[in-house]
Image (cartoon, rainbow, N blue to C red):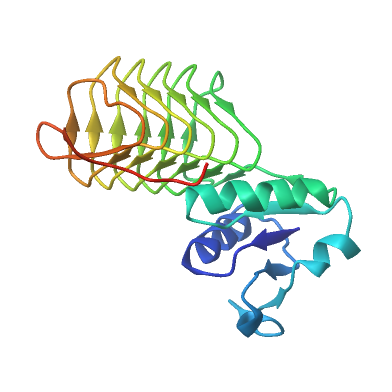
Amino acid sequence: MVVYGAGGHGKVVAEILLASRQQIAGFIDDNPALSGSHVLGFPVFTAVWLQQNAGAQIALGIGDNSRRELVANQVASFGGKLIATIHPSAIVARSASVGAGVVIMPGAILNPECRIGDGAVVNSGAIVEHEVCVGRYAHLAPRCVVAGGVQIGDFAQIGIGAVVLPGKRVGNHAVIGAGAVVIDDIPANVVAFGVPARVHSQKSHSN
């Protein structure tokens, strides 16, 4: 088992695995400057490691949503298996659904019948209420609160401490700023912030 990504996000993912009593062989990182070095005492490999270890278990340690999808596709092309990484302090309802490559960080709460799409991140202390649907490769930042029945689109990002009120929708690739309160649906491909959250700009993306 290795963590793909040796930056700050990857370090957190590695610590989650260690807290879960998992053994890791090290990190993979595309930065040639890190090749052959050590992070948290573990070696850093290049992506060639994937070709040499077909079927290895891979935890996604990439913070950027779009980049995380690219890495997940690369892992799949080499026969790697993406694993969900869940900190033992997280509370995950029995009826919650967690996809491949998901990361659930310390203190997060996933309530009944929520669905977390492949490659999504539920960061430290985030609350995902009942029947929420979080899209693929979305990111819920630390201490945000997503109320019951909310739908979060693919690649969307909910900022630190933001709140999304019950039943609202946040579109694909939308970004909700830190501390915002979403009281209305937010369309795709926009940046919204404030209390209440208002759309302030369009967001460009490569997906």
Left or right of 71 on screen, residue 187: left
Question: 189 or 46: which is nearer to us?
Answer: 189
Left or right of 107 on screen, residue 36: right
- Quarter of the picture holding the N terminus: bottom right
Q: How many marks?
A: 0
Residue 168 location, x and y as percent?
29, 18
Left or right of 11 on screen, residue 37: right
Tell me: residue 68, above or below residue 166.
Answer: below
Tell me: residue 133, above or below residue 91.
Answer: above
Residue 112 location, x and y as percent?
46, 18
The residue drawn where x is 41% and y is 47% is 123
Residue 159 location, x and y as percent?
29, 45
The image quarter in which residue 37 lies: bottom right
Residue 127 location, x and y as percent?
35, 34
State the residue lying farthest toward the left.
195
The image quarter in which residue 150 lies: top left
The residue drawn where x is 60% and y is 78% is 39
Question: 197 or 4: which is nearer to us?
Answer: 197
Left or right of 126 on screen, residue 161: left
Tell me: residue 124, above or below residue 100.
Answer: below
